[in-house]
Image: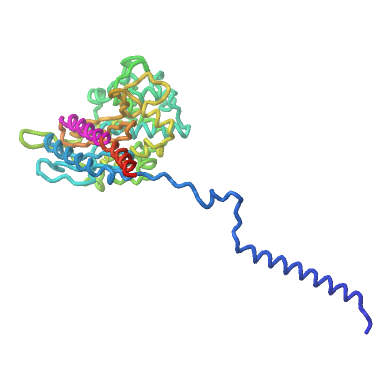
Amino acid sequence: MKFNSKFFFRLILFATVALIISYTMFQNFAFSNFETYPLDTSEVIEPKPKASVPDYTSLYADEIEILQEQIQNKAKRYRINGSVLVAYKDQILFEGDFGYKDPAKKTPMETGLSYQLASVSKQFTAAAVLKLHERKLIDIDHSVSNYLPGFKFENVTIKDLLKHRSGLWNYMYLTEQYWKKDIAPDNLEVVDLLNTYAPRLNFPAGRYFSYSNTGYVVLGAIVEQVSRLSLGEFIQEEFLLPLCLDETFVEKTELNEQSILKGYQSYRRSFIQLPAGFHNNAIGDKGIYASAKDLHVWFRDLKNGKILEQKNVDLMFGRDDDRKNKRYGMGFRLENEANEPVIFHNGLWDGFRNGLVYYPNDDLVVIVMTHTQNKRKHYFQKQVVRNAKSLIQTAERKPKQKESESELIL
């Protein structure tokens, strides 16, 4: 048989290619079942553990039991009809409801009911304005007239309104004197009243601090003008819905009427229900309804920088560089107790007396809400704060004591 060199070389070539392909497939199969690691595998194999957060309700159980008894005794003594919440490092240590939902009929208080926040509402308005400021839709250092065309007091800035340094007249006086309609003016109509009937400012804008509900109604009008939403709609869309605050409302409706407490005034040996205030059509200075628990969730996320950028939270809490006004941040009052900063706001309207107090050094929040025009709420709130701070001081020594005891045993 004659030797065919061409066929032979083709066979050799085919066998070589087949061998290479087989070897490559074997490598892929063999080594694909083994994970490969860098030389230093510590980051992959042993990730850094997250810092554990203590359960303070368990850790401080004995102290919380004492706090609960103290608050209950004081609530009974001061005849409180309302709700109390104490939170430490974002954990609720105590929450309770006291007295009556309807004090005239002696209907017991229920959990989760919403209170008219009165001036505690101002923090929501300030947050709405600062949210627009973050989006560069407004500049708080600019004149109000830039955003409310025709606003006659051109030297008044948005920051002046936020910090109660505007010098604007009290809109309620103007309404009572000049407003002739049966329904009270809304925010933009209040601005028209100011433009028409306020002849001048009470003092040059920015010079003095003078607490002003008018300023926060005008802020509400700015939010409405810029966002093209009502202030209530803006707060609902930006804050309430994302935080799932279903016990917080910006207006009363047939759907939420049963969830919102009515305000009462003591009369002789009983109580009478108070009608809604005539000025309730304008909001921003008041007008938010919330339960104690919802208010805690809101404030927790606000102080932790989850609602606004931290620099704007600092503005609200008076931590900015411009510290001319040490009495008010933006939406919050400021105080110092024994060189300790206190951030707070109280509210009084339509029979409701409410308060939120925050001690940043301890990360302690106390919320007290009432609906029966009880003037002793002020003293009750101070007692709750005092007892809560005492709990923290006592309880914080416990881990150290246990640590030192364990070291002695070893």
Left or right: 22 with respect to 357? right
- Give the vertical position of 248 relative to 361 (above or below): below
For the image shown, how many numbered marks are present on the structure?
0
Q: Quadrant of the N terminus?
A: bottom right
Please, which residue is most extreme toward the bottom here?
Answer: 1
Q: Can residue 349 be seen in this view?
A: no
For image coordinates 44% across by 23% down, the residue present is 141
Per the rendered image, the range of residues in magenta is 375-393
Q: Main secondary structure of the magenta part?
A: helix
Name which quarter of the figure residue 77 lies in: top left
Q: Position of residue 37 (x, y in %)?
A: 60, 54
Residue 346's spot in the image, x, y percent? 25, 30
Placement of the C terminus among the 4 image quadrants: top left
Q: Is residue 57 visible?
A: yes
Assess whether residue 260 is covered by the magenta stretch: no
In the rendered structure, does residue 380 fall within the stretch colored magenta?
yes
Q: In which quarter of the image is residue 75?
A: top left
Q: How is the image coloured?
A: rainbow
In this image, 19 relative to 309: left or right?
right
Location of residue 42 in the rendering, given as x and y in whole percent from the top left corner? 54, 49
Task: From the viewer's side, name the closer residue of 68 and 313.
Answer: 68
Residue 31 is situated, as x and y percent measured from the top left of the image, at 64, 63
Give the camera-side residue of 329 and 92: 92
Vertical position of residue 12 compared to residue 243: above or below: below
Can you name the residue that lies furthest to the left here?
269
Determine the image quadrant of residue 114: top left
Asked whether 8 or 62 is in front, the reply is 62
Identify whether 111 is placed above or below 180. below
